[in-house]
């Protein structure tokens, strides 16, 4: 399955998520690529749109290898972090929080984050390659006591989908395609242009007013 762009993928996911229209739910998009899809879905289902801001903590010698993840409120560490200096983890967490705070203020200004307590949280991204980062994010979202956590993605690798389906942290997974030749998310979009911060801000502002 090849999607024309993120808008088409969002429309197809919105159709699959029709049962949540008007419910006590929130679309939680992962920036930046998940936001155009999240906007389409939120608009179709008459639901609020928020972003979930998180970033992995990279290994000190292999930055691409995640040893944990941080949000503005929470932190989660993997077993690999046990071998890493607590000072390094503390300093990286401070740097990441500063970056996330700047990004949040840029996106939202003075607006406070929406409470997720007792809400159906629908996490949206434009695709998932490994599933590790989104699982870390979901573990931290549990601290906010949502009613349900649902993941909705257009495309994922078979191994990533299996990870999501095997965890007890997620109530449902909606995935449109799991191609056997998966190498990268962008492979399944005709138009996979990078989404900029300005586009995210515009879509969040439009979602607030709609």
Image (cartoon, rainbow, N blue to C red):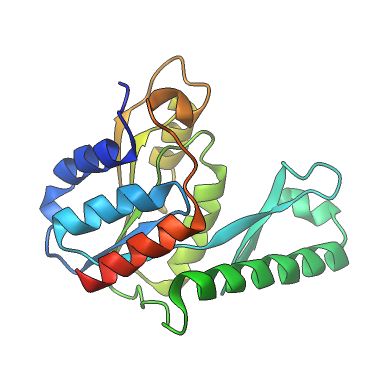
What is the residue that sits farthest to the top in this orientation?
181
Q: Residue at x 84, y 50 (%)?
A: 60
Q: Where is residue 57 shown, x and y percent of the image?
A: 70, 55
* x 46%, y 59%: residue: 198
Q: Residue at x 40, y 25 (%)?
A: 188
Say which of 192 and 67 sits in front.
192
Q: How many marks?
A: 0
Instruction: Where is residue 108? Give x, y as percent.
Output: 44, 75
Residue sitting nearer the eye, 183 or 157: 183
Query: Residue 190 at what x, y percent from top left?
Result: 37, 25
Does residue 109 appear in the picture of this structure?
A: yes
Q: Quadrant of the C terminus?
A: bottom left
The answer to whether residue 147 shows anywhere in this view is no
Image vertical order of residue 126 relative to residue 77, above or below: above
Residue 58 versus residue 183 in the image, above or below: below
Q: Is residue 152 left or right of residue 144?
A: left
Q: Is residue 101 left or right of residue 12?
A: right
Spot occupied by residue 27 in the image (x, y as percentages of width and height): 30, 60
Compared to residue 45, the image places residue 151 above or below, namely above
For the point 20% across and 37% down, the residue is: 12
Above or below residue 145? Residue 186 is above
Q: Quadrant of the N terminus?
A: top left
Q: Quadrant of residue 157?
A: top left
Which quarter of the figure has residue 209? bottom left
């Amino acid at each position: 399955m090849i999607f024309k762009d993120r808008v088409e993928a969002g429309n197809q996911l919105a159709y699959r998520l029709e049962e949540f229209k008007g419910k006590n739910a929130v679309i939680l998009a992962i920036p930046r690529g998940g936001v155009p899809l999240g906007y389409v879905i939120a608009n179709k289902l008459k639901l609020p749109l928020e972003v979930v801001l998180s970033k992995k903590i990279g290994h000190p010698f292999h930055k691409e290898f995640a040893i944990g993840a941080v949000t503005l409120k929470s932190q989660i560490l993997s077993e690999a972090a046990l071998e890493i200096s607590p000072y390094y983890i503390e300093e990286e967490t401070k740097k990441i929080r500063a970056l996330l705070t700047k990004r949040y203020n840029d996106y939202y200004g003075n607006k406070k984050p929406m409470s997720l307590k007792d809400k159906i949280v629908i996490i949206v991204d434009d695709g998932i390659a490994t599933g590790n980062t989104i699982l870390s994010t979901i573990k931290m979202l549990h601290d906010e006591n949502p009613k349900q956590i649902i993941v909705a993605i257009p495309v994922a690798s078979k191994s990533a989908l299996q990870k999501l389906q095997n965890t007890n942290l997620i109530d449902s997974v909606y995935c449109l395609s799991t191609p056997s030749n998966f190498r990268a998310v962008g492979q399944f979009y005709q138009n996979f242009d990078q989404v900029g911060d300005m586009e995210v801000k515009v879509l969040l502002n439009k979602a607030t007013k709609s």
